[in-house]
Image (spheres, grey):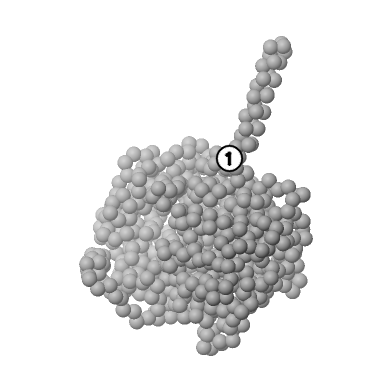
Amino acid sequence: MSFRSVQRFFVLLFASLIVSAVAAQEKHPLTVEDLLEMEKVADPQASPDSRHAVFVRSTLDLEEDKYRSNLWTVEVDGGNLRQLTSHPEDDTHPRWAPDGKTIYFLSRRSETSQIWQIAIDGGESIQVTDQPLDIQHFTVSPDGKHLAFAMDVFPDCENIDETKKKLDEIEESKSTGRIYDRLLIRHWNVWADGRRSHLFVMPVDSGEPIDVMKGMDADCPSKPFGGSAEFTFSIDGRELIFASRDVGEKEAWSTNFDLYRVPIDGSEAPENITAANPAWDTAPTFSPDGRTLAYLATSRPGYESDNVQIILRSWPMGEERVLAPDRDLSIWMWFGFGVLRFSPDGQTIYTTPVDTGQIGLFGLDCKTDKVETLIKKGSVGAPSVTKNRILFTWNDRSHPPELYSVNPDGSDRRQLTYFNREKLAALRLGEDEQFTFRGWNNETVYGYVVKPVGLDAEKKYPVILSVHGGPQASSLNRFAGHQIFAGKGYAVVMIDYHGSAGYGQAFTDSINNDWGGKPLEDLQKGLAAALKKYPWMDGKRIGASGGSYGGYMMNWIAGNWPDRFRCLVNVCGLFDLRSMYYSTEELWFPEWDFIGTPWQGPENYEKHNPANYVQHWKTPTLVVHGEQDFRVPDTQGIATFTALQRRGIESKLLYFPDEGHGVRKPHNVIQFYNTVLEWFDYWLKTESDVKKPI
């Protein structure tokens, strides 16, 4: 090599090092704006020939305070990624036509949400349905001749036009009062107006939709989080199988969802095919040959968090058996988690249970009951099965959601999209770690730590104990706001206390009628274990936060662990269990967790009631609540703030008139995190416990 070549080599090397150093300096911790700007990948659907996938890509439009969604396609091996739709209105819920040449999807390109169609090669989209009401979910029959979709209608109206006419009359009326004669009068964040989500079937080419749930005072999909996984065509396309809770006046305290079969022409009334089970039946899925119906079922009525089993039924009305009965899987049936997917040969079912803080991808052999874990760590979503690969979305605490695929045996995992690669490369994130300790009854409990960005083990860092809601949920390993706090120099500790999902049904069941007992003990022991394991955590500067049940725990901690924390953040938390029962919407969860109603067992509602310990409160608290929260009504947050103010405790109330159970709108999310960070910074970023009022 000549001197000039050597000189050029070192010049280039030096320049490269400078660029790398500058790039490293330009990296920054995750902010709330960064979190919101991460693009979302969802709902992947494999093509019938197993060559392509269509999926939804959503990007932030902060000016409009929303996310915009379009359809994209990619080959299963990761090649030929391209945008399929680009309309200003959202395009979602893609579903393939059986011939693989076109894709159906939902869009509001007309005045209402309707089904549209576009060729796989692109071109102009074609409107398929033109109904006067919004279509919310749909599926395509196996032969491609029919569509089944959901619309909200008045059950006593003869047809769709009558529902539209009645809605117009209500809109034009000068009086606004509604009369109710039974529960549910409101649900999650919406007041009931008498309409029900009914399934309709219509030919793809032409014809009038037929309400196959005509007269049923019930919903399919279930509200508020149900979807198209709750209904399916039979393989021959002649029938529809759907899940619904048709229990009349018991709706507010019942979890008795059943499966119904009905001919697509509506010539017969729906037949309840799981009437023998008084608990929850849902997610009907046919094997490729149509000879087996798989579905999810619980066995204890009134218990949403009961052990979920996969049932295999010989179709049409043959014998049933439980798949892998000896395996205790925590399969959630809400928020779109309860999905079953058959392999092309019908021998394996794929699903996504919660497992020790992860949402994994599992394969269950339908003959041998053998269970294999294909993806263990992180959070898997929306699996879709091809002949040779399984598509899914995946994320963890350090990686936002992208599209992936894997072989049926779990090998050769590939990332197919990289929408967030540049954004992620510009960030400095905190390392996360899982640990275990001995909790209640000396049993193993799992904890999780997100370390401060740029951790220097010789320094001391303030700590935030983050308590998950549920309580039968989990501190899932997914990309979320914990990294925002790590970026501001906080250590975040999470504990999957007794009652959490993903550790066996006995672990989940253990807090029945014990909301303030075992979980608090686990939080106390878990925090102590974290402080011992990580000496760089500052045990003198600790705050705590939680939402929903986690917010309940903030109020419970205030009265029963009052000297541990410098400050608390209570998001949509419960204050008074007795009044909560009388103002929430679905009553099955307090009736199960507190063993009956307040008049049947008042002592159970008072035993762990935060309202009974206000006299011990002393910890400064930020309260956050939304006016549209009907699960934990806003009066619970207002009562918390009232108690704090009357006690003379330093406190603030952040109240959102346009939010429900949690904070969703982008601008509100920014305000939420900024307010919470300001609160923690004020109380935790100094050595002194003495503060001036803020």
Quadrant of the drawing holding the N terminus: top right
- Residue 135 location in percent, x, y? 34, 59
Can residue 618 be seen at all in this image of the molecule? yes
Task: Write the residue at 61% across / 54% down.
Answer: 485
Q: Is residue 373 left or right of residue 175?
A: right
Q: Residue furthest front?
A: 692
Which of these two is toward me, 418 or 67?
67
Q: Residues within 10 Å of mark 1 (few under 14, many from 20)?
A: some
- Residue 27 location in percent, x, y? 60, 40
Q: Is residue 243 left or right of residue 15?
A: left
Q: Residue furthest bottom?
A: 600
> Label 1, on which residue?
426
- Residue 515 location in percent, x, y? 62, 75
Q: Is residue 108 left or right of residue 497?
A: left
| Amino acid at dot 1 | Ala
Quadrant of the drawing holding the C terminus: bottom right
Q: Quadrant of residue 5?
A: top right
Task: Write the residue at 45% across / 53% down.
Answer: 667
Dot 1: element: loop
Relative to 74, does residue 16 appear above or below in the rendering?
above
- Residue 459 location in percent, x, y? 74, 50
Task: Write the residue at 45% across / 68% down.
Answer: 629
Which of these two is toward me, 310 or 449?
449
Can residue 264 be seen at all in this image of the molecule? no
